[in-house]
Each structure stands twice: as C-alpha cells, then as structure tokens.
Image (cartoon, rainbow, N blue to C red):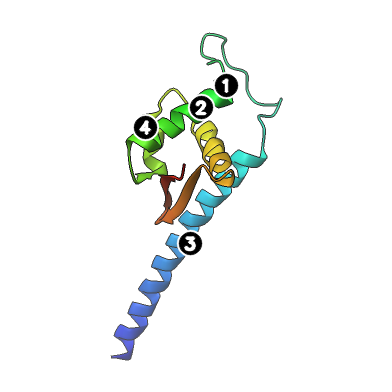
Amino acid sequence: MSFILLLLLLAAGVFIYRWLTIMEKEIRAEIEAVDTAPSSGAPTEKLSQVKPAPDTDVIADQVLAMIHSHPDLLQKDIYALLPDLDKNQIQKMLIILDQSGTISRIRSGNTFKLKLLT
C-alpha cells in the first residue's frame, strides 16, 4: 500500500514539475519579448525576405479587431489569426494593451484569455 502511495506522489511531482517548467518558459519568453530589442549582432536576412515593420497603431488595431470578433480568444490562438504579424510584436502589443486597461489578459492554463474592456 505504501508503495502505491509513493508512486502516486512521484507521478504528481513529475506532473507538477513539467507544468511549472512550461509556465516558466512562457513567462521568460514574454519578458524577453518586452525587454529585449533586436540586437545588431543578429544574422542578416536577404532583403527580399525582410518584411517592413507595421506601425504600432496598425498592430493595435488588428489585435483589437481580432479580440472584438472572437470573444474569449486565447493568446495562443491569436498568432494564427494574424499571420502577417510576428509573434513577438503581438505579445508586446498585448502587454501594452493590458497595461493601458484596453484589454484584460486572464491566465488560462498555459496561456491567457483575452477580453476587450472598452
């Protein structure tokens, strides 16, 4: 009986460890996306592959339009809905909109549920 209990505790520990590791990676990615700017040491791309950076107002408008048209949209799903935008651009904009009180980001598992506040 105690062996089964030990196995259950071990399995629960492994599950919790994996869950925390996933959350940590997501948090670190968001922090890095906000805190770091593209470095000058980044590999250069061919000019034909470089997309012009959209204006922040354009990004905000597209993100807000998606949140408005998809109630209870998850952050992990918005990236596929906006294929022309870089994931880092979307993450930065979501954080800015959340901090300004335009949207709310509510933790939902390993992602955030996005809601329009205004």
Disc number for residue 20: 3
Q: Looking at the image, do the residues carrying marks 1 and 4 touch, with CB atoms under 8 Å apart?
A: no
The residue lying at 69 percent from left, 29 percent from top is 39
- Is residue 9 depicted above or below 51 in this figure? below
Label 3, label 4: how many angstroms apart (C-alpha)?
25 Å
Question: Is label 3 or label 4 in front?
Answer: 4
Disc number for residue 59: 2
- Of mark 3 and mark 4, the one earlier in the sequence is 3
- Is residue 113 depicted above or below 62 in this figure? below
69 vs 52, left or right, is left
Give the image location of residue 42, x and y in percent: 65, 26
Front residue of 88/41: it is 88
Q: Name the residue under label 1.
A: 55
Task: Say what amino acid the circle numbered 3 marks.
Answer: Leu
Label 3, label 2: how many angstroms apart (C-alpha)?
31 Å
Give the image location of residue 110, x and y in percent: 42, 53
Residue that protrudes farthest toward the bottom in the picture: 1
Quick one: label 4, few (<14), some, or many (20+) residues within 10 Å?
few
Label 1, label 4: how many angstroms apart (C-alpha)?
20 Å
- Of mark 1 and mark 3, the one earlier in the sequence is 3
Front residue of 32/40: it is 32
- Is residue 19 depicted above or below 11 in this figure? above
- Of mark 4 and mark 2, the one earlier in the sequence is 2
Q: Mark 4 points at which residue?
A: 80
Front residue of 56/6: it is 56
Quick one: label 1, few (<14), some, or many (20+) residues within 10 Å?
few
Question: Is label 4 or label 2 in front?
Answer: 2
